[in-house]
Amino acid sequence: MHRLILCAALVLAGCATPQERSARLRADMERDMATYGPACAHLGYTAGSDPWRACILQLSTKEELRNSAYPSSFYGGYGPGRWRGGGFWGPYW
């Protein structure tokens, strides 16, 4: 019974109105502008310009991919070379 209540609470906590999602996205963008804006300005982009915003999005996306829980390779990081010379399956399987 407790699990059912917990699951229901988690599902309801995940629900957000369009206004809440919009506010969250706006806050994320403001945080990204504060974080990456100075670097893009230092790279020569005029603050507030479209190229400056594109630079911010590019740096933010790059950082998100770097910190992602999922590897960026097609094989999920376990393809040829990952286990070369040893690993779970032993040397060269």
Image (spheres, helix red, strand yellow):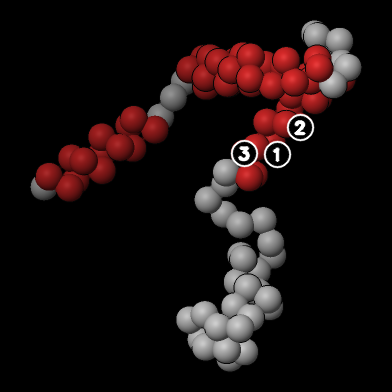
Which numbered disc covers residue 78?
none
- Residue 28 position, x and y percent, is 57, 21
- Residue 15 position, x and y percent, is 40, 29
Ranked by sequence position, the earlier of labels 2 and 3 is 2
- Residue 71 position, x and y percent, is 61, 57
Name the residue beneath numbered marker 1.
62
The local crowd at label 3, few if under 14, some if 14 to 19, many if 20 or more residues have their Cα within 10 Å, is few
Can see residue 60?
A: yes
Name the residue beneath numbered marker 2.
58
As measured in the structure, the alpha-carbon distance from the residue carrying label 2 to the one carrying label 3 is 10 Å
Q: Residue at x 12, y 44 (%)?
A: 2
Q: Residue at x 53, y 50 (%)?
A: 69
Q: Secondary structure at mark 2?
A: helix
Check contact, mark 1 vs mark 2: CB within 8 A. yes
Q: Secondary structure at mark 1?
A: helix
Q: Secondary structure at mark 3?
A: helix
Q: Residue at x 55, y 83 (%)?
A: 86
Q: What amino acid is at disc 2? A: Gln
Name the residue beneath numbered marker 3.
64
Which of the 4 quarters of the picture holds residue 70? bottom right
